[in-house]
Image (tube, rainbow, N blue to C red):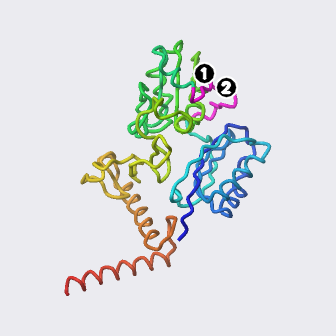
Amino acid sequence: MSTEKSLVVAYYKFVDLPDFEARKQPLLELCEANGVKGTILLAHEGINSTMAGPEAGVEAVLEYLQSDPAIGELVVKRSWTDECPFYRMKVRLKKEIVRLGMPEVNPNDQVGEYVAPEDWNELISDPDVVVVDTRNDYEYEIGTFKGALDPNTKTFREFPAYVEKELADKKDKKIAMFCTGGIRCEKSTSYLLKEGFDKVYHLDGGILNYLEKVDPEDSMWEGDCFVFDNRVAVDHSLKKGDYEMCRACRHALTEEDLKSDKFVEGTSCPHCYDTLTEEQRVRAAERQRQVEISKALGRKHIGATQLEREEWREMKLKERADRNRKRED
């Protein structure tokens, strides 16, 4: 069995890509040929991705992207993991590379002031600065910067409503925002400038860049950083944290959550059990069944052919027969 670690990279760039649709298939084929998995989003406004795989394969894809004059140099956050945190490669076409629900808000037109990780502590220590975490509530819950406000949003699309309700009277204040890799706070600053805010700042490269650049002894970060892959969260050294993830609602789960009667692997957890519809439960249960089939067959991705489903059923029937024989003995 191979012991090669997977290189995980996260990157995005707001750049005009009028031909973004034509880029999908060549990029997908290149990733698959190099054993790279994850997700790449393409839109008129740019590219956004987290992907992983063998180092040579990942670097080949990055080289291909950066050799494209329309894209150019990318700011890439790198980390390592024992297993690839993705099951397959997906290249998706979108209206926005991060969904605010307002395609007209484009950081290619205007954006707030970038603040380097080394200067971030000084900015957010200023009592006159309003520090806002632009991420979702389940991300904020397991880690954030000291003193940061939680907008209590379930999705990024709810952020404009939060601004209208809680920040509209603070247009003359300094507003400092941050997110995981920089993309949401970059778009947030563009939105705030469009709404008439005067002094808007954001953490360059996001939390991941801060954790990489700032010594833990000097850090104002508290907790772990949620990531949207099978690692669930990373600590200050960018190593996998101690959380599992609910596959139904994507909430990070603690040991206590996993012991709850409301936790059903792949289907529900204490954070979503009482809100799921029957249709959502059925869909989540089916997805979990596909995961179990893949694991039983030693596959690295979910989704099974009819033949593989039959093999899985035969395996389960054999296991059941073996258990019955043991009980009879």
Q: Is residue 147 left or right of residue 70?
A: left
The label on residue 175 is: none
Residue placed farthest to the right in the image? 69
Where does residue 299 sit, x and y in percent of width and height?
Answer: 50, 69
Looking at the image, which residue is at 44% across and 21% down? 166
Looking at the image, which residue is at 56% across and 48% down? 79
Among numbered discs 2 and 1, the one appearing first in the sequence: 2
The secondary structure that most of the magenta stretch takes on is: loop
Looking at the image, which residue is at 53% across and 23% down? 176
For mark 1, what is the residue?
A: 193
The reply to whether dot 2 and dot 1 touch (C-beta < 8 Å) is yes
Residue numbers of the magenta segment: 102-118
| Residue 108 belongs to the span the image colors magenta | yes
Q: Amino acid at mark 1?
A: Leu
Q: Is residue 138 left or right of residue 117?
A: left
Q: Secondary structure at mark 1?
A: helix
For mark 2, what is the residue?
A: 110
> Badge 1: few (under 14), some or many (20 or more) residues near its Cα, within 10 Å?
some
Quadrant of the image containing the C terminus: bottom left
Q: Quadrant of residue 320?
A: bottom left
Residue placed farthest to the top in the image? 172
Q: Is residue 189 left or right of residue 20?
A: left
> In this rendering, is residue 201 above or below 16?
above
Where does residue 44 sit, x and y in percent of width and height?
Answer: 69, 41
Where does residue 158 sit, x and y in percent of width and height?
Answer: 47, 33
- Is 100 in front, or is 73? 73
